[in-house]
Image (spheres, coloured by chain):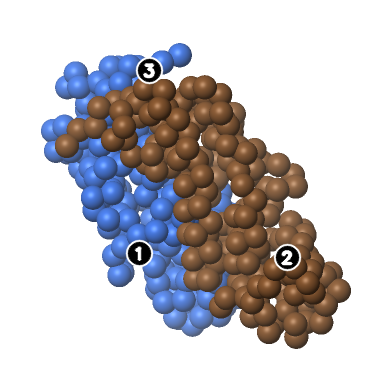
Chain colours: A brown, B blue
Amino acid sequence: MEPQRRPGGRSARVREAVLDATTAELAERGYQGLNVDSVAQRAGVHKTTVYRRWGGPEGLVADALERASEQPWPIPDTGTLAGDLRGLAELVRVGFDDPESGPVATAFVTAGMQHPDAAAALRRFYAARHDEAAVIVARAVERGEVEPDIDADEVVRLAIAPLFHRLFITHEPVTAEQARRAADVAAALARTPRES
Amino acid sequence: MEPQRRPGGRSARVREAVLDATTAELAERGYQGLNVDSVAQRAGVHKTTVYRRWGGPEGLVADALERASEQPWPIPDTGTLAGDLRGLAELVRVGFDDPESGPVATAFVTAGMQHPDAAAALRRFYAARHDEAAVIVARAVERGEVEPDIDADEVVRLAIAPLFHRLFITHEPVTAEQARRAADVAAALARTPRES
């Protein structure tokens, strides 16, 4: 479901309060512990308001992701492709490792495995993130570091997919060295002529 | 918790029946729908037997994963690194796409995001799978296709991590072409001299 959105005014303030409460609840209890009553109480709104506008936990997660994607990523600009990709991989690693943002980010991923609305929201969220990060590759093309026909999206994904694989599939910790290595592999691939 | 295991005999037959029932329930209802009562009923055993030996859904999933890892992967042997990695990536893709195995495999991954016992079981399961698949790289070294100091585990992970990333993080479909491409990237990396 698509929540109504009006810029400014009471509706926007309610949305901010409810999504702040959603984020705080996700940080404390994870997606499985998210419920409309606690969110409504924390936000100081009536629970019927939350049910009417967001439907349920999956609608809250979807809108919280929508809001999160409005906050741009601090894409690194170090002057080299490898440096920028290292910065990007480190951004992902730290984002999940941080005691404040980590539990929320983890709850978003967990929600995607449990509800199709959350999965669709994650798909949109990461599509936007990958688009933002593609500037790293565009700059490398401008500098002549890589060929113009490079698949920017693939390079971005390659720098971060191994981290997600460890965090959420094989359940292994991710070190700064592993993040660096994933970035370097993506940079090496970017410089390798593509085979047919 | 570690379930008791005695080779052969009634205990082994009970385990088979309970894990078959667990797998069938996971296929039908996913991890969130898994409960001890339904598994016990389906297996034709008393539910206290299941609670005592497996503790709960997370113990059932952990032991089902343990049993699954006893079934070896049909590791491809095509004569080239790229061919073998393509076969491996396709094995993963088809495993999640197949109407029979897909829902169970997906339920395993989902369980790992929801319970630490399941996460630990997945970590062991994939460590064993990656060990099995490393033979692909060992053969390539024997053939002189790649340098002996190659990190086999990294090459294996690289051929499959992008698929897991699509399936469970960004929630995008994975095509046979994308699986092939992930394998080719891993093969290309394996042939690229490692930078410090």
Q: CA distance from mark 2 to mark 3?
A: 45 Å
Q: Helix or strand or loop: what does disc 2 sit on?
A: helix
Q: CA distance from mark 3 to mark 1?
A: 36 Å
Q: Chain of mark 1?
A: B
Above/below status of A169 relative to B33: above
The local crowd at label 2, few if under 14, some if 14 to 19, many if 20 or more residues have their Cα within 10 Å, is many
Identify the disc placed on residue B76: none
The C terminus of chain B - image quarter: top left
Q: Amino acid at mark 3?
A: Arg
The local crowd at label 1, few if under 14, some if 14 to 19, many if 20 or more residues have their Cα within 10 Å, is some
Disc number lying in front (3 or 1) = 3
The N terminus of chain B - image quarter: bottom right
Identify the disc placed on residue B102: 1
Please name whichever residue, A63 or B59, is drawn nearer the observer in this view of the structure. A63
Q: CA distance from mark 1 to mark 2?
A: 34 Å
In the rendering, at what x and y percent does residue A85 appear? 50, 31
In the rendering, at what x and y percent does residue B65 appear? 45, 56
Identify the disc placed on residue A19: 2
In the rendering, at what x and y percent does residue B41 appear? 49, 82
Left or right relative to B84: residue B59: right
Q: Amino acid at mark 2?
A: Leu
